[in-house]
Amino acid sequence: MTLRLGRHSIRLSHLLAVVAGVVLVVAAIADTRFLDPVSSAAHQPEQFDPPAYAQEQFPVISAEIVATATDLTVLAAAIKDDPAAAGAEYGNDLGANQYAFPVWATGTVTEVDDEFIYLEVPGMPDGSDVRIPRNTSLSGIPVRDATGMIGFGDFNTQTDFQSVANEFKLLMQQEVLAPADPPSLADQVVNVIGGYSSGGPADLYLIHPVQIEVAP
C-alpha cells in the first residue's frame, strides 16, 4: 500500500510540474510583444554607411590636419631626440608607443613612380627618406588617426572603424592625388600636408596627403 501511494505521489508531482511549466510558457507568450517585419526593422540599429560617413568627415579631418600640421623637419628632429616626447607634443597617441601626426613639408620632387612621389626636403636629418604614397602604399589610417577626432570607440565594430580608413584612401586618390597629376610634379617644388604614422623604418617618412600644391 505504501508503494502504491508513493507512485501516486510521484505521478501527482510530475503532473503538477508539467502544469506549472505550461503556465510559465503561457505567461511568457502573453508578455511577449511580436513585431511585424516593418516594426522589427524600425527597432534595429541604423546600418553604418562608410562612404557616406567618409564623404562627410574627410573634409572636416583634412581641414583640421591643415590647421594643426607640424613642419616635418621639426617633427623629425624631435623624434630623433625623443620619440615619446615628440609623440606627446605633436601627435595623437595610438597606444603601444605608436603615434599619428598631422604634418607638412616643402620639397623638390626628385622622382615619381607608380607607388611614390619622392621628395628632397631641406632640413631633414641625414639619411631621411620622404615620400608621398600613391597606390597600394597609400593608407587612410594616418589621416583618420592624425587629429584624434575619430576613434575606435565611435564605432560598433573594428570593421566599421577600418572601413573609414579605406574610404579615406579612395577619397585621397580621387580628390588629392588625381588632381595633382603626380607625373607632372617631377622636378617641381611642392607643398604637401597630410598624416604620418610612426612605427615604420626610422628614417622613412610617408606623408599620406590631404593637400598637394606646387609651390609658388
Image (tube, rainbow, N blue to C red):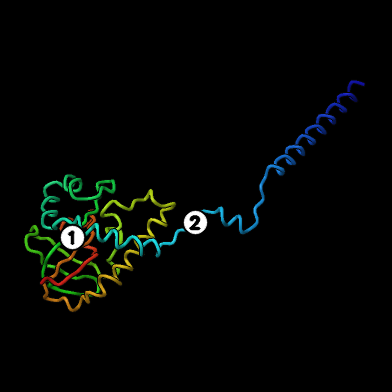
Quadrant position of residue 120:
bottom left
Q: At which x and y percent is residue 96?
A: 28, 46
- What is the quadrant of the C terminus in the image? bottom left
Q: Which residue does the numbered mark 1 point to in the structure image?
A: 205
- Mark 2 packing: few (<14 Cα in 10 Å), some, or many (20+)? few
Image height of 148 relative to 172, above or below:
above
Q: Identify the image quadrant of residue 127.
A: bottom left
Residue, disc 2? 46
**Secondary structure of the residue carrying numbered label 2:** loop
Q: Which residue is at 39% across, 61% downward?
A: 53
Name the secondary structure under disc 1: strand
Left/right placement of residue 101 relative to residue 144 reads left
Residues at marks 1 and 2, CA–CA distance in whole angstroms: 39 Å
Which numbered disc, 1 or 2, marks the residue that appears first in the sequence? 2
Residue occupying the point 86% across, 24% down: 6
Characterize the local packing of mark 1: few (<14), some (14-19) or many (20 or more) Cα atoms within 10 angstroms: some
- The location of residue 173, given as percent across then percent down, is 29, 70
In the displayed image of the protein, which residue is found farthest to the bottom?
A: 184
Q: How many marks?
A: 2
Kind of residue indicated by mark 1: Tyr
Give the x, y percent position of residue 28.
70, 41
> Which of the two marks, 1 or 2, is nearer to us in this view?
2
Observer-nearest of 134 and 177: 177
Q: Residue furthest top?
A: 2
**Residue 17: assigned label:** none
The N terminus: image quadrant: top right
Q: Nearer the viewer, residue 66 or 151?
A: 66
Which residue sits furthest right?
1
Which residue: 13% across, 57% down? 71
